[in-house]
Image: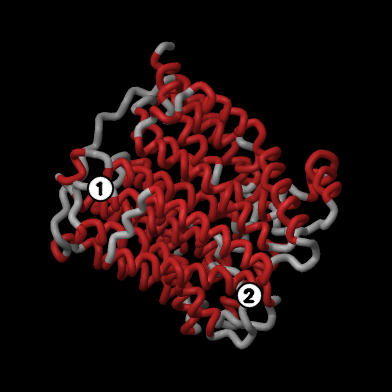
């Protein structure tokens, strides 16, 4: 019954992706449909938990099959033309080597997830929370400690879904998320570079990065969050390319489809880890900047594109904040800060629908200065209390730099940035480069607001280089799982990489 239920949702999302015309490759559509089916199932289970019907698998199956039947009636929907699928390129021996290596890693992760129980403290709480969803119903149960009760429910909802169908190996979803990330990453690089060798090598680098593979069978929130966020950026990049393409005017609906897809993926990232709503301000602000300078679209079309990105992005987190507002216990300080930021994003989008910001250089500098003032004001009022402001910033700086030690082999590819004149890059790739600058900055701001785990600077040297097991699974280290797929995608698109592979 589980296969029938989830299979119906998988086919449903596969059909919807085909209608959006954003993924020409069948493999890419299948992998993307899997990721989106998880998000759709989480919303269904969320509604069932709220109504107390989670344990009734027949209701779940009925909803899935009913939704598929509705979408399957294509005559009831507006006509959509099928996207043009480019002819499949002949697969090289290197491609099959990649399939073999990553396939073995996937099978090892699958075996670990299936046979070994959850032993990690956070994972145990997500499992407990899932059982509460399943047997008690509601979201504000005192069985779960306040900290975990206020976390977004995506992973516990999926655990509850599997448990309701009698599947105890709930970690089984993570190897498939790992696999879907790699498939989409490969297909996106092929689409952008039109070079199979580049896609093979960079997908191998991503898939064999130890921390990524390790998280393919760990019951944490971070692989799901990192996958959704980084995939959202890849499709967001395609949207930015549309803004600079002369063909964009011919099919403005495609730009809206890309915005809708990337916004949904961003929203699912925040549905898994709430602080990623703050990271989502980066693509929203850059898109507003690009739309303001785009002469191709009229104001109405620009608003439509912005709404297609922003509404699904903000929907998931707003749904959870509304749920938190019904809790008897007050919101934690960090959660409340993210909620206020979410309200600010809604205000930013709604204001921009009426007026253009015209973000010239002077205004950008002014906004940056205002952001700095607000940041220091927030730190003075609600920042860490265990250490002084200066020491907190220094500790966060050390943490922000040291987390990259756990991605050292992958980070080494950054050397290619020094072989390229970044000012001469195409504008979309240049904006992606700015994105990669803003992400670590947002990472620094978020974790400087949180209290440090250790208050002595010497402790951070010890936990990175002497006893790395103490820090390899801290939130700041895991938060970079969303950064490295984007970095690799950016490097793969550099002209120096293309020239290198073309000269082979």
Residue 497 x %, y %: 45, 22
Say few, some or many: other residues with alpha carbon within 10 Å of mark 1 (under 14 / 14 to 19 / 20 or more).
some
- Quadrant for residue 194, please give it: top left
Q: Secondary structure at mark 1?
A: loop
Residue furthest out toward the top: 504
Whether residue 119 is visible to the viewer of this picture, yes or no, is no
Q: Secondary structure at mark 2?
A: helix
Residue 358 x %, y %: 31, 55
Whether residue 479 is visible to the viewer of this picture, yes or no, is yes
Q: Residue at x 40, y 54 (%)?
A: 363
Q: Which residue is mark 2?
A: 149
Give the mark count.
Answer: 2
Q: Residue at x 18, y 60 (%)?
A: 74
Say few, some or many: other residues with alpha carbon within 10 Å of mark 2 (under 14 / 14 to 19 / 20 or more).
many
**Residue 373 circle label:** none
Instruction: Classify 475 as above or below 418.
Output: below
Instruction: Classify 22 as above or below 489.
Output: below
Which of the two marks, 1 or 2, is nearer to us in this view?
Answer: 1
Residue 56 x %, y %: 48, 78
Instruction: Classify 225 as above or below 200.
Output: below
Q: Residue at x 17, y 47 (%)?
A: 251
Residue 357 x %, y %: 33, 59
Quarter of the figure with the C terminus: top left
Depth order, front residue of 10/87? 87
Quarter of the figure with the N terminus: bottom left
Residue furthest out toward the bottom: 328
Q: Residue at x 71, y 54 (%)?
A: 393
Q: Which residue is mark 1?
A: 294
Instruction: Tell me the CA gap for discs 1 and 2.
Output: 44 Å
Depth order, front residue of 326/383? 383
Task: Of the two numbered discs 1 and 2 on the same chain, state the one appearing first in sequence.
Answer: 2
Horizontal arrangement in the rendering, residue 210 relative to residue 207 (left or right): right
């Amino acid at each position: 019954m589980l296969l029938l239920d989830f299979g119906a949702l998988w086919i449903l999302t596969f059909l919807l992706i085909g209608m959006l015309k954003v993924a020409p490759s069948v493999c890419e559509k299948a992998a993307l449909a899997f990721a989106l089916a998880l998000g759709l199932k989480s919303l269904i289970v969320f509604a069932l938990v709220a109504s107390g019907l989670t344990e009734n698998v027949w209701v779940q199956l009925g909803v899935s099959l009913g939704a598929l039947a509705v979408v399957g009636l294509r005559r009831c929907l507006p006509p959509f033309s099928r996207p043009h699928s480019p002819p499949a390129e002949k697969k090289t021996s290197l491609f099959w080597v990649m399939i073999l290596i990553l396939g073995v890693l996937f099978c090892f992760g699958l075996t670990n997830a299936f046979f070994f129980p959850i032993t990690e403290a956070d994972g145990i709480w997500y499992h407990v929370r899932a059982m509460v969803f399943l047997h008690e119903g509601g979201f504000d149960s005192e069985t779960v400690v306040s900290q975990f009760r206020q976390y977004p429910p995506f992973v516990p909802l999926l655990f509850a879904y599997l448990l309701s169908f009698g599947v105890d190996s709930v970690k089984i979803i993570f190897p498939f998320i790992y696999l879907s990330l790699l498939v989409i990453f490969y297909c996106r690089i092929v689409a952008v570079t039109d070079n199979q060798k580049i896609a093979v090598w960079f997908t191998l680098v991503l898939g064999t990065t130890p921390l990524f593979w390790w998280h393919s069978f760990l019951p944490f929130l971070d692989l799901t969050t990192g996958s959704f966020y980084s995939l959202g950026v890849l499709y967001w990049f395609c949207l930015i390319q549309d803004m600079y393409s002369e063909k964009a005017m011919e099919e403005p609906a495609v730009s809206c489809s890309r915005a809708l897809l990337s916004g949904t993926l961003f929203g699912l990232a925040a549905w898994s880890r709430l602080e990623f709503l703050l990271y989502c301000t980066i693509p929203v602000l850059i898109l507003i900047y690009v739309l303001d300078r785009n002469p191709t679209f009229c104001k109405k079309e620009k608003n439509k594109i912005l709404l297609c990105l922003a509404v699904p992005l903000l929907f998931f987190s707003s749904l959870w904040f509304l749920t938190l507002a019904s809790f008897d216990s007050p919101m934690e300080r960090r959660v409340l800060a993210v909620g206020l930021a979410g309200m600010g994003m809604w205000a930013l989008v709604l204001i921009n629908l009426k007026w253009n910001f015209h973000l010239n250089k002077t205004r950008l500098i002014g906004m940056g200065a205002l952001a700095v003032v607000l940041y220091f004001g927030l730190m003075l009022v609600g920042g860490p209390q265990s250490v002084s402001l200066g020491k907190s910033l220094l500790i966060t700086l050390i943490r922000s730099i040291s987390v990259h030690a756990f991605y050292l082999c992958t980070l080494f590819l950054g050397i290619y940035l020094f072989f390229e004149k970044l000012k001469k890059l195409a504008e979309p790739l240049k904006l992606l480069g700015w994105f990669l600058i803003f992400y670590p900055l947002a990472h620094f701001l978020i974790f400087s607001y949180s209290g440090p785990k250790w208050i002595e600077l010497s402790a951070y040297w010890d936990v990175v280089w002497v006893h790395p097991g103490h820090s390899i699974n801290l939130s700041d280290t895991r938060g970079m799982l969303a950064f490295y797929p984007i970095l690799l995608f950016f490097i793969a698109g550099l002209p120096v990489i293309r020239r290198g592979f073309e000269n082979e």
